[in-house]
Amino acid sequence: MPPRNQSVFAQSLAEEVHLSDRVKAAFASVDRAPFMPTGLERQAYELRAMPLGSNQWISSPLTVAKMTMALECENADSVLEIGCGSGYQAAILSKIVRRVFTIERIEKLLVEAKARFKALGLTQINTRLADGGGGWTNYAPYDRILLSCEAASLPQTLIDQLVVGGILVAPIGGTITRAKKLPDHTIATTTLGQAAFVPLLNGVEKQ
């Protein structure tokens, strides 16, 4: 059953994952139900992943929380997300970061996500239908980059689009990895635990 309100949901999440006050407020302000597939809205408040269609998933709120915290994005201006999916992660980020850029390779999913953003008044989220592996050079460099899909290794193309001092978070080999770009342009990495994601794929899938 849904919680009494979003604050209750955010609190239940915070009891499982450490959240800063601002990240907790973001979860309290974004209802997960509109991002769920039709018929599964009542399961939106369960802390687990759900099938989205097109062989994709809407991540568990626990995973979204861990990835968001790993970005350390509270003082960031721009974030690039690879793998928009339902749009839930981008919506959470939009409550923390001024500019969100999100790429999706499956047109059907992107069309649905854009409709959700419009309905919720999330005008600062910029979307693009493209192969996410190439990033989005038009607005680079980004303060933060998040891969909501698993890569075999840290994509150099995306590292190149990250500001010095910026952070990239990505599932690499089943492990959430945080990579920070140092002043000499080398990368310092930290592993933050396991997570299951769909793989980063090439090409665009149109309707």
Image (cartoon, rainbow, N blue to C red):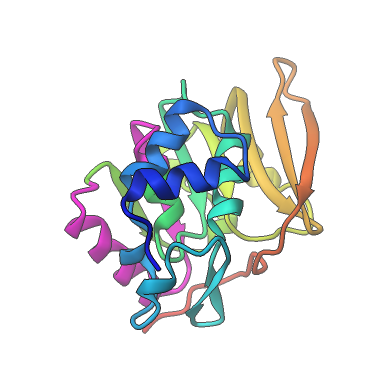
Q: Is residue 111 magenta?
A: yes
Quarter holding the N terminus is: bottom left
Q: Is residue 126 magenta?
A: no
Residue at coordinates 39% horizontally, 33% vertically from top-left? 96
Residue 151, given in percent of the width and then of the height, sits at: 72, 58
Residue at coordinates 36% horizontally, 73% vertically from top-left? 41
Numbered label tally: 0
In the displayed structure, does residue 169 sit left or right of residue 6?
right
Residue 113, given in percent of the width and then of the height, sits at: 33, 64
Q: Which residues are magenta?
A: 93-122
In the displayed structure, does residue 82 sit left or right of residue 27?
right
Q: Nearer the viewer, residue 80 or 69?
A: 69
Residue 176, given in percent of the width and then of the height, sits at: 73, 48
Q: In the displayed structure, would residue 2 be above or below residue 31?
A: below
Quarter holding the C terminus is: bottom left
Residue at coordinates 37% horizontally, 63% vertically from top-left? 2
Residue 5 visible in the picture = yes
Q: Nearer the viewer, residue 204 or 112?
A: 112
Residue 100 visible in the picture = no
Q: In the displayed structure, would residue 154 be above or below residue 72?
A: below
Q: In the displayed structure, would residue 144 be above or below residue 186?
A: below
Q: Nearer the viewer, residue 133 or 44?
A: 44
Residue at coordinates 40% horizontally, 78% vertically from top-left? 40
